[in-house]
Every structure is written in structure tokens, then in C-alpha cells.
Image (tube, rainbow, N blue to C red):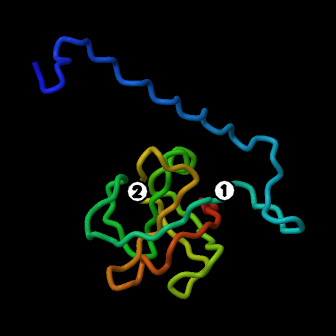
Amino acid sequence: GDADGDADEPVAPPAQATPAAPPLAPDAGQPTGGAAGAPPVPAGTVAVERLGFSFVTGGPGACGMVLEAWTHVAVSRELLAEYGCGARVRVTLDEPAGGRDVFEGVIGDTMNPQFARTLNVYVGVDEPAFEYGLSSGTITPLD
């Protein structure tokens, strides 16, 4: 036996984890646009709740193209399904970063499945990506 003499006692199964909250329903029927009095979001525009910045690595993204700074973006999987690899998009940042608040880019990569309504802007390795922090914004298809 072991030190406390319970070697022959059955081991209880691990407690069941609390089930995760159900996924949020799409915003169908919700008015588009931002704060009260803001202009409506143009057709096809999606509000991005989490907009971050990643360094280019010199390698290809999930879409097979070599990722370039301020040219390519990674999007969460539902946005990739909506727009597709290689789609040209306008990204509007709610808070300017790198001296920009809007730019045109190309979807070149996707993100891990836990992310939704998320976009990462690829920036140069010489830029302070972490100082740019997390923001929000919109993505609008151009094609």
C-alpha cells in the first residue's frame, strides 16, 4: 500500500467540467453602425471586436502567399469563410497605429478557431507591434 493506506480504495472519476456557454447567436436583426448617431456600416462591412498586430515572418500564411507588412491581414475563420483567401479589403482602425487609421489589404492568413470577429494586421519586424496594442475597427470587402 501507499503511505496513507488507501491503495485499495477506488479512485473517484474526475469532476465533470462545467460546460462552456453556448455560442453567441449572430447579430441578425441588430441595427448596423456604431454609437448612436453614427452613420450605418456600409454593406458587407463587419465590425471587428479584436484587432491586433503581428510581425511578418517572411513565410507564407494559410492562404499560401508570403505575408507582407501593412499588405496582408489574418482574419478569424468566419471572416475567412465570408470573404475568402486573397480578398481585397479596407481595414479601418478605431485607434490609429503606425500613423494609419485606414488601409487596403489582402486576406492572406487565418487564426486559431477560438477567435471570432478578429483581425490581425501584419507589420514589419522593425515596428512596435506590441505598443500598437489591441483595438477594434471594421473590415469592408473591396471586390
Q: Which residue is mark 1?
A: 46
Q: Position of residue 85 (x, y in %)?
A: 45, 52
Residue at 41% in and 24% down: 15
Q: Position of residue 19 (x, y in %)?
A: 52, 29
Which three-letter amino acid code belongs to the residue tagged 1?
Val
Q: Between residues 10 and 15, which one lies in front from this camera angle? A: 10
Seen in the picture, residue 103 relative to 87 is either above or below; the reply is below
The quadrant of the rendering that contains the N terminus is top left
Residue 7 badge: none
Q: Position of residue 64 (x, y in %)?
A: 32, 55
Q: Which residue is mark 2?
A: 109
Q: Is residue 61 left or right of residue 80?
A: left
Q: Between residues 75 and 43, which one lies in front from this camera angle? A: 75
- Residue found farthest to the left: 1
Q: Are marks 2 and 1 in contact (CB under 8 Å)?
A: no
The total of numbered circles placed on residues is 2
Q: Between residues 115 and 14, which one lies in front from this camera angle? A: 14
Residue at 45% in and 76% down: 70
Rendered image quadrant of residue 11: top left
Q: Give the class, few, some or many, for how many residues have Cα within 10 Å of label 2's Cα (few <14, many ≥20).
A: many
Residue at 36% in and 79% down: 124
Which three-letter amino acid code belongs to the residue tagged 2?
Asp
Dot 1 lies on which element? Answer: strand
Residue at 35% in and 52% down: 62
Q: Between residues 25 and 89, which one lies in front from this camera angle? A: 25
Rendered image quadrant of residue 136: bottom right
